[in-house]
Amino acid sequence: MREIVESATVEKAALNRNDSDLAQLKQSLDDMGKAVTDGTSGEKADLQFHLAIAKAAKNTLLVELLNNISGLIQDSMEETRKIFIYSAQKTMHRLHEEHVRIYNAIKSQDSSEAVMAMEAHLTEVRDTILTNFKQY
C-alpha cells in the first residue's frame, strides 16, 4: 500500500512543492542524518519526512490518510530501522542516502526521478524486511 500511495504523493510533491515545503523536508532529512551519526533509530524524523512529502503534494486527502495511519507507519519504520541496523548488507547510512535522493528530486522538481527514488527506497525496505524475516 505504501508503494502506491507514496509514489503518487512524491510525484505531486515534486511538481507542487514550495520553499517552505523544502525547508520542512530538509529539516527532517537533517534530523535523520543526526540519527545516523548518533546511532539512534530516527524513525520519527523518517515519518516527518514522509508526512512533509504529502504536505508538499498539496493533497489534503493524502495528508489526512498518512496522518491517520502514521502510528502504523512509525511502528513499521521502527522495525525496519532495527532490521537495517542489524542487517549485514544494509546500513542506516544507506537508508539516509535513499531519502537524500528523494529530497533532491523533489527540490529539482523532477517528478520522474522522485517517483523512481521513492520506488527504489520502498523496494529496498521491502526486500530487506523479507530477507531478514526469512532468516528468523
Image (cartoon, rainbow, N blue to C red):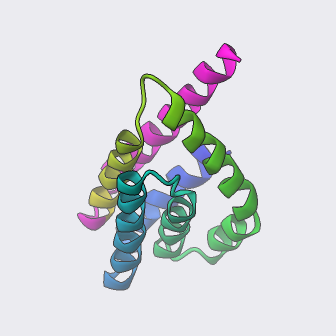
In which image quadrant can residue 66 be found? Answer: bottom right
Task: Please tell me which residue is depicted at 40% across the width and 56% down the height of the picture.
Answer: 38
Residue most extreme to the left: 108
Residue most extreme to the front: 38
Residue 107 image position (x, y, % from top left): 27, 66
Q: Is residue 108 magenta?
A: yes
Viewer-side residue, 18 vs 69: 69
Q: Of helix, strand and loop, which mostly describes the magenta segment?
A: helix
Residue 118 image position (x, y, % from top left): 44, 47
Rendered view: 130 above or below 8: above
Task: Please tell me which residue is depicted at 63% across the width and 77% down the height of the picture.
Answer: 60
Q: Is residue 110 visible?
A: no
Task: Please tell me which residue is depicted at 50% across the width and 64% down the height of the picture.
Answer: 45
In which image quadrant can residue 17 be found? Answer: bottom left
Residue 12 image position (x, y, % from top left): 45, 64
Quick check: 30 left or right of 122?
Answer: left
Give the quarter of the figure containing the C terminus: top right
Q: Is residue 93 magenta?
A: no
Task: Please tell me which residue is depicted at 35% across the width and 66% down the height of the picture.
Answer: 30
Disc tally is 0
Viewer-side residue, 19 vs 41: 41
Give the quarter of the figure containing the N terminus: top right
The magenta segment: 107-136
Rendered view: 45 above or below 99: below
Residue most extreme to the bottom: 20
Q: Is residue 10 visible?
A: yes
